[in-house]
Amino acid sequence: MKEIVVLSGKGGTGKTSITAGFAALGARHLVLADCDVDAADMHLLTAPKIQTEEDFYSGKTAKVITEGCVHCFKCMDVCHFDAVLHIDGEFVIDPLECEGCSYCYHVCPTNTIEMLPRLAGKFYISKTRFENTLVHARLGIAADNSGKLVTKVREEAKKIAEEQKLDYVLVDASPGIGCPVVASLTGANFVVLITELTVSGFHDLSRVNELIEKLNLKSGCIINKADINNKMSAKIKAFLESKNIELLCEIPYDIRFTEAISLGKTIVEYDDGILKEKIITVWEKVKKLVSK
Amino acid sequence: MQIAIASGKGGTGKTTLAVNLAMLLSEKFAGTGQKVLLTDMDVEEPNSGLFLNGELIDEEVKYRLVPEWIEDKCTLCKRCANICEYNALAFLGISVMIFPELCHSCYACSDLCPEDALPMVKHRMGMTKRYRLNANLHFMESRIDIGVEQATPLIEQTRKFITENYDKSWFTILDAPPGTSCPVMEAVKDADLVVLITEPTPFGFHDLKLAIDTMKELKKKYAVVINKYGIGNDNVLSYCQNEKIPVIGKIPHLMEAAKLYSKGKIMIDKLPEIKKEMEKIYSGICKLTEEKA
């Protein structure tokens, strides 16, 4: 079983469109993991039927028990997150600010603070219309994306792939380079970078590439919207060569990607020409590279 | 006045709106004494600076505090590891390992150590730079170092720096990170209005609804701008109309705009239809925050 992570640094470069294309092609041979738990979109193209749904708890939140509190203000004094408020003569914890560190709990002389498990979001296992299993999640509104829910999605996908002896776990990661991205990359066998020919696309690609170099991961790169800026094309290709990253394919800017999304379809279903062909070719390439 | 430009989905046009609006306002306010500050709060992947040229005012390395283990003082009582909720401290035989990327800087281990063996010390997060773009326009960006996992502490320091150094007379525009969780929440905390920019596709629509939920939870005033208007479908617009959410701008989908963006160029001086829309967005902001346009 091999884990393939689709990554871009910058948002809106086509991660989900291209990953969904791979998912349609890989069908039963892979488990799909939507690790962008903050703004998950994979379900919009794969029409999953939810099979398992569970609450995901991560970390803690403090709660003040009013009865017995002697108003010593210690909890408020020690909190570094300004999460303890004193309203109308009573202590209240602001759950949006509380980081669950338990410092207040440890210093409370009357044991009138309790630490409760924090509901961080929802977690789902579904079957897509391509008959692959999709593991996905929904981070709670205004919740903390520390990467724990991402890790849960990735690990669950891996477990299912191992149990069913499937070939691949295909991970759609979130934009950025912080905790959720690092959590998506743990255990990856191959990274598919997607960039676009813009100054931001290049800037973000080079930052995310530094991260995968640090983690010592193998990667290849897809250039999307590849006809928008010829100068940038030469620049990015030179960069890929200097970093020894294989250029997997170049996909032209094409409104058909948007049209496909608007119909809830993947590009390999909607297009019957060059785009479909490109996605098929690149998916075959990725499969070869990951098993090397 | 402070406005934040945010979006659930990435790549919908936050940076385009932030830099073009800042340039427009700088031009508009010339000679009036009104000043503009643009700040890139997407510390993981800051892009606004790619569109701007200016003179560096100052730069500063940013730190947060994490515990450091003083071996000589430690009696190996393990209180710190038992207290830490983030597994940021581990005992390996007779030594203590500290994992700064897991540490939330809560100070509990440090303050509660009976031997004072865990003083808080500086841990580098990244850099903040400030530029003067022209007489009435400042630009600031913060970026985390590669390998630093927590974005929120640097966003918080940047937000506080603005409060301390730029009073309310500045028209402040924040380019927020994508998503709906803690980094965005931290970035928009002081904003008088959050402008949510989206694209009229099912992805844009879905993530806009998530972003709206977050703004409601934070009790923030918000408005919507539709970018790449003309592609996709009308669902975003009809949803906003039904929910009575103000749509203060529709930036047309233009191939020429995409090309300018790809080169890192400002659009308002080249594309009058984009400039007109930026003017509309500005008057929409003024109307919602009740400032004179």
Image (tube, grey):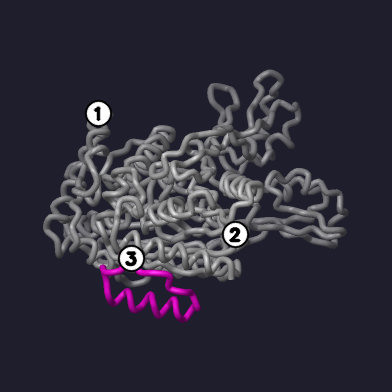
Residue occupying image coordinates x 30% and y 70%: B53
Of discs 2 and 1, which sits in the foreground?
A: 2
Q: Is residue B68 magenta?
A: no
Q: Residue at x 36, y 37 (%)?
A: B209
* Amino acid type shown at disc 2: Lys
Query: Crowding at label 3, few (<14), some or many (≥20) Cα neighbours within 10 Å?
Result: some
Residue A205 vertical position relative to residue B241 in the rendered view, above or below: below
Q: A138 or B137, which is in the foreground?
A: A138
Please indicate whether residue B109 sits to the left or right of residue A187 in the image. right
Disc assigned to residue A233: none
Query: In the visual, does B33 lie left or right of A166?
Result: left
Residue identified by numbered label 2? A2
Q: Position of residue B260 (x, y in %)?
A: 23, 66
Left or right: A63 as drawn, with respect to B293: right
Which comes sooner in the sequence, label 3 or label 2? 2
| Contact between labelled residues 1 and 2, with CB atoms less than 8 Å apart | no
For the residues bearing labels 3 and 1, Cβ distance under 8 angstroms? no
